[in-house]
Amino acid sequence: MGYHSSDSWHAYFQDFAYTDQGRTRMANINIADLPAKTFAELICSPTMDVYVGESRRHWCLHRDLLGYHTPFFQGQSHVDGKQKFGKVELLEEDPHAFELLVKWLYQGKIDNVSDLPLEKKWDYAEACQKLYVLCDKVKMPQLKNIAIDQFRKGCYEAGLVPGPEEIKPIYDTTPPRSPIRKLVSQIAARQIMDPDSDSNAGTYKMCFEANADFAVDVIDAIRQGSGTKLFHDPTEETGCFYHDHDHGASQLCKVG
């Protein structure tokens, strides 16, 4: 590719397809499968400083390599119509999730949770959950799909599921009908309906209050999970099942 000047963006795009969600560029060729010459050209480009999380953890990443994977960083380098190369700040994102993204950028893969010891599976699953949200933001659909698969597998192998503290940020940062919303709402629905679980609807009160979509998604998941089973008709009841009585006064009720 030759020399890359510091005042222009020469992103190398090999072969891109568009997703069904719009003109999101997506590399068809995994970085690990690129010819050595092409990969060398990508990492000979100028670097960009990326700061992640509240701690502003710093990465120095090759600009054309970023451009190969996603147009997001190119867009972030423009301010008021002018190119401002130098740094990108992702201060609301998780540094551990970004570590996984960096590995994907340069190696075309992330770790398999099945290869990790049991005590590390949940932490890795949680990082993959945050990686999914990060990939949704930076428009990297291939890695996003891998992240959600690793998250699901990690939950299963660790025997743990996300609670309301993990679910609320997902609904705060993802769009309606996002696949990860569907996943975590189905997890919550299953926990609520599981007779052996300590969870109930009140467990997820903070999520219900924060986002009405979560309530709708959970109810839809419960309906789907219950199949064709029809609940008992409460209008058929006789007596004072729905009266407002003082404690113990229901035995004396003469209404109805």
Image: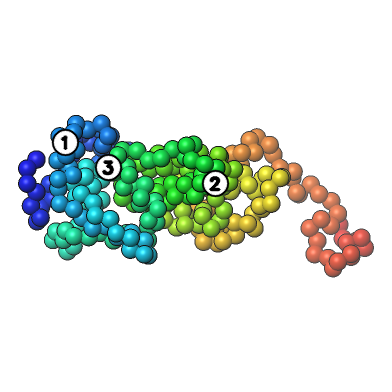
Q: Are marks 3 and 1 in contact (CB under 8 Å)?
A: no
11 on left or right of 192: left
160 on left or right of 104: right
Label 3 packing within 10 angstroms: few (<14), some (14-19), many (20+)? some
Q: Position of residue 197 (x, y in %)?
A: 68, 48
The three-letter amino acid code for the residue at tag 1 is: Thr
The residue pinned by badge 3 equals: 106
Label 1 packing within 10 angstroms: few (<14), some (14-19), many (20+)? few
Question: Which residue is rendered at x = 12% and y = 46% of the image?
Answer: 10
Question: Which residue is rendered at x = 41% and y = 42% of the image?
Answer: 147
The residue pinned by badge 1 equals: 38
Q: Nearer the viewer, mark 1 or mark 2?
A: 2
Quadrant where the N terminus is found in the figure: top left
Q: Residue 119 bears which disc, if any? A: 2
Q: Dot 3 lies on which element?
A: helix
Quadrant where the C terminus is found in the figure: bottom right
Q: Nearer the viewer, mark 2 or mark 3?
A: 2
- The image shows residue 58, relative to residue 16, as above or below, that is below
Label 2 packing within 10 angstroms: few (<14), some (14-19), many (20+)? few
Question: Which residue is rendered at x = 34% and y = 38% of the image?
Answer: 109
Q: Earlier in the sequence, mark 1 or mark 2?
A: 1
Q: Dot 2 lies on which element?
A: helix
Q: Position of residue 116 (x, y in %)?
A: 48, 40
To which quarter of the image does residue 220 belong? Answer: top right
Q: Earlier in the sequence, mark 3 or mark 1?
A: 1
The three-letter amino acid code for the residue at tag 2 is: Glu
Q: Position of residue 236 (x, y in %)?
A: 79, 47
Task: Pick the residue in front: 122 or 254.
Answer: 122
Measure the alpha-carbon separation of dots 1 and 2. 39 Å
Q: Dot 1 lies on which element?
A: helix
